Image (cartoon, grey):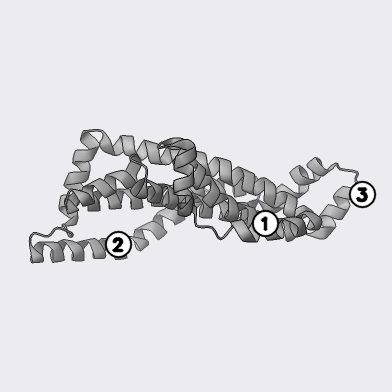
Amino acid sequence: MDAATPLVRWGTLTAKALVVPVAGLLALEWYARAIGFSDSIAPPSKALIELLGALRDGTLLEATGFTLYASGLGLLMGGGLGVLLGLVLGLSRRAAQAAFLSIEVFRPIPSVALIPLAMMVFGFGVDMQASIVAFATFWPLAILTQAAVRQVEPRLLEVATVLGLSAPARVWKVVLPSIVPRLFVALRLGVGVALVVAVTVEIAANPHGLGFGLSMAQQSLRPALMLGWLFWIACIGFALNAATLALQEAVARRMGGVA
């Protein structure tokens, strides 16, 4: 019963939260049918029909797989390196001071500004897109991890030192368990950033994935299909966030915490 409680709570909150989106879709359905034919607006019911058509012919699943793979690969690389750097900077003030200027110079660079450079290095495809996603997710994961490490209780580190634990052992047995909740906050942010950047790159430059499908529907003046792709991207974002929350609750229960 206890294990099912978070799922029940999540389901209840989701049901209540659906009231506003459903009302918005009904209003859009009425408005689109009231104005008749349009090159930019289509009823959600027609968008669903177009989306089912894209699902039947395989283009939707192919594009979804490409976007999720590229964004996941970029998040794995950028987020993983960001967490490692955040641990180092959080544990060593000298390292943080030495890296401060470099971080403040490179962090504000918009990730999409790297598209021309990434295209020259990698060409079109997964590598180019994943590299940009990695750059975009690296900074928030590094900064949030550093902040989380700085908030670890100093006495815990002092006890670990007295017990003679090595630096890797202190990180594994003291630091990481202490920052797990904050790491999941960073992970949720990273997942959202990865999806947004991946779709943006596909719209701007990469002829693959969900963003490219959305762009092609717009250019071919098919508003129903365009809205269908857009709704699908929103559903993917919602599902990824829900999966991250479920993972966070599972880890919290396993560690004896409160989800």
> Which type of secondary structure does the marked residue at label 2 adopt?
helix
Q: Is residue 145 left or right of residue 173?
A: left
Q: Which residue is mark 2?
A: 21
For mark 2, does the 10 Å Cα neighbourhood hold few (<14), some (14 to 19), or many (20 or more) residues? few
Q: Earlier in the sequence, mark 1 or mark 2?
A: 2
What's the mark number on residue 162? Answer: 3
Q: Earlier in the sequence, mark 3 or mark 1?
A: 1
For mark 3, does the 10 Å Cα neighbourhood hold few (<14), some (14 to 19), or many (20 or more) residues? few
Q: Which residue is mark 1?
A: 102
Residue in the image at 65% along x and 57% along y: 103
The CA span between labels 1 and 2 is: 43 Å
Residue in the image at 82% along x and 59% along y: 154
Residue 225 point in image, percent of width and height: 20, 48
The CA span between labels 3 and 1 is: 34 Å
Quadrant hosting residue 65: top left
Q: Is residue 65 left or right of residue 72?
A: left
Q: Is residue 39 above or below residue 60?
A: below
229 vs 130, nearest the viewer: 130
Residue in the image at 46% along x and 40% along y: 120
Residue 234 visible? The answer is yes
Residue 259 visible? The answer is no
- Amino acid of disc 2: Pro
Which of the two marks, 1 or 2, is nearer to us in this view?
Answer: 1
Q: Is residue 3 left or right of residue 125?
A: right
- Amino acid of disc 3: Val
Residue 259 point in image, percent of width and height: 57, 54
Residue 107 point in image, percent of width and height: 59, 57
Q: Is residue 81 above or below residue 18?
A: above
Residue 106 point in image, percent of width and height: 60, 56
- Amino acid of disc 1: Ser
Q: Earlier in the sequence, mark 2 or mark 3?
A: 2
The CA span between labels 2 and 3 is: 55 Å
